[in-house]
Image (cartoon, helix red, strand yellow):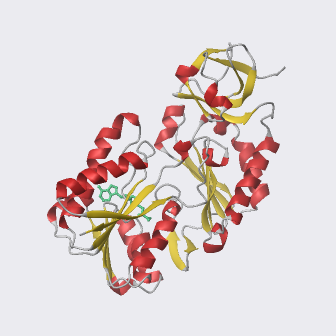
Amino acid sequence: MTEFNRIFLRPGKDKPVLQRHPWIFSGAIAGVEDGTADGAIVSVCDRSGAHLGYGYFNGRSRISVRMLSFGDRAVDGALIRERLLSAIEKRKRTGVTVTTNAFRAVFGEGDFLPGLIVDSYDEHLVIQILTLGIERMRETVIGLLEDVYSPHSMYERSDHAGRSIEGLAGRSGQIIGNTPEEIIIRENGLRFIVNVRRGQKTGFFIDQRDNRSLIARISRGRSVLNLFSYTGGFSVAALAGGALEAVSVDVSAPAIQMAERNALLNGLGDRSRGVHADAFEYLRGEDIPYDLIIIDPPAFAKNRESVAAACRGYKELNLQTIKKCRPGALVLTCSCSRFIDMDLFQKVVFGAAADAGRAVSILHTGHHPADHPVSIFCPETAYLKSLLLQVD
Ligand code: SAH
């Protein structure tokens, strides 16, 4: 019935596919038709040969197939266009495009386009291709993005370490137009400088927008310590919200310089201070005479194997902070490791609170915002977790 090569699932392994989970792990596959190339679109079949849907294949990856459609819907440019348009609609419906001009326009599995990330910074697009399957459709995807968004420019930051699992080298560079060295974006009334060429990830951690807004609301009259500050997003939000001072700590010198510039850009430079340091060492060495502390480390768990070590890292940060902070202090503690869910993260923070011997309440739990939609079929798309703690 199809010109596509077929892969066959082991008995019982069709259930997640029937439930629209987009990932098929290598262990679920009973057989692959001869000549099926890595990166090719395949017809996914159950053990009896009945077609379940289409996805792209990569025998090198533990996730050997990522599904693009279920049932008979063909995978073509029209399908991708439909998904892009639906993604734009979601951002508009949830008001994201009103509060900011920096948003995630395509969030991989969350927008039913596994392997593709697109961020929009004042209508300059930055794309990140994470899988061989999308790499094979690169020209189509770029053409459609150009058509659907009419962006000022398009830049590629496919330098994610995860590409090596897919057998892909990193690639970054200009695709369309001329992306400025620095783009000034606005978020909830504040302005930030974004360097999409040299910044981390695609340039800015847009996934913390809602938490930055929370911090702005609770900062008045508080002294703020922003650990893992990157370019000072939380510091600027806190100062704009009336914080007495904000200290940004990051191990990256360019990030700290940019944090200072971002504070100045918003007229808040006089109450901002940058510290170029390792946050673990900083916490061990210093007193913490602050009454709002933000802990937003990078993803410590890059895979399932590193979860235990990652938990030790999170525990250490939270233990030192909870132990040393002022009575009544607020702590916003975050984890962006996909392999650590909220349940486990809360247990780690519980362990830290118990060891610190302080009374801790959770005042608020947070997630990434609406431009990072979570597919109900793929709970793994929810990666950012945060707890706002009060420490007495
Ligand atoms: N909260 C930021 C994003 C943080 S991203 C925002 O809202 O924009 C994580 C940051 O941690 C990066 O800037 C990285 O340079 C920094 N980092 C990584 N390891 C670190 C360490 N051991 N000590 C201090 N900073 C670290």
Residue placed most toward the observer, 49 or 195 = 49
328, above or below 350, in the image: below
226, above or below 65, in the image: below
Where does residue 79 sit, x and y in percent of width and height? 79, 43
Picture quadrant of residue 12? top right
Which residue is located at x 62 percent, y 41 percent? 114
Where does residue 282 sit, x and y in percent of width and height? 21, 63
- Residue 87 visible here: yes
Where does residue 71 sit, x and y in percent of width and height? 77, 31
Where does residue 45 sit, x and y in percent of width and height? 71, 20
Residue placed most toward the observer, 139 or 11 = 11
Residue lying farthest right?
A: 1
Which residue is located at x 57 percent, y 23 percent? 59
- Residue 152 visible here: no
Indicate the quadrant containing the C terminus: top left, top right, bottom left or bottom right: bottom left
Query: Would you say 236 lies left or right of 32 here?
Result: left
Picture quadrant of residue 284? bottom left
Quarter for ligand 1? bottom left
350, above or below 184, in the image: above
Indicate the quadrant containing the N terminus: top left, top right, bottom left or bottom right: top right
Query: Would you say 64 lies left or right of 222 here?
Result: right
- Number of labels in the image equals 0
Residue placed most toward the observer, 163 or 232 = 232
Residue placed most toward the observer, 42 or 293 = 293
Which residue is located at x 36 percent, y 69 percent? 256
Which residue is located at x 68 percent, y 19 percent? 46
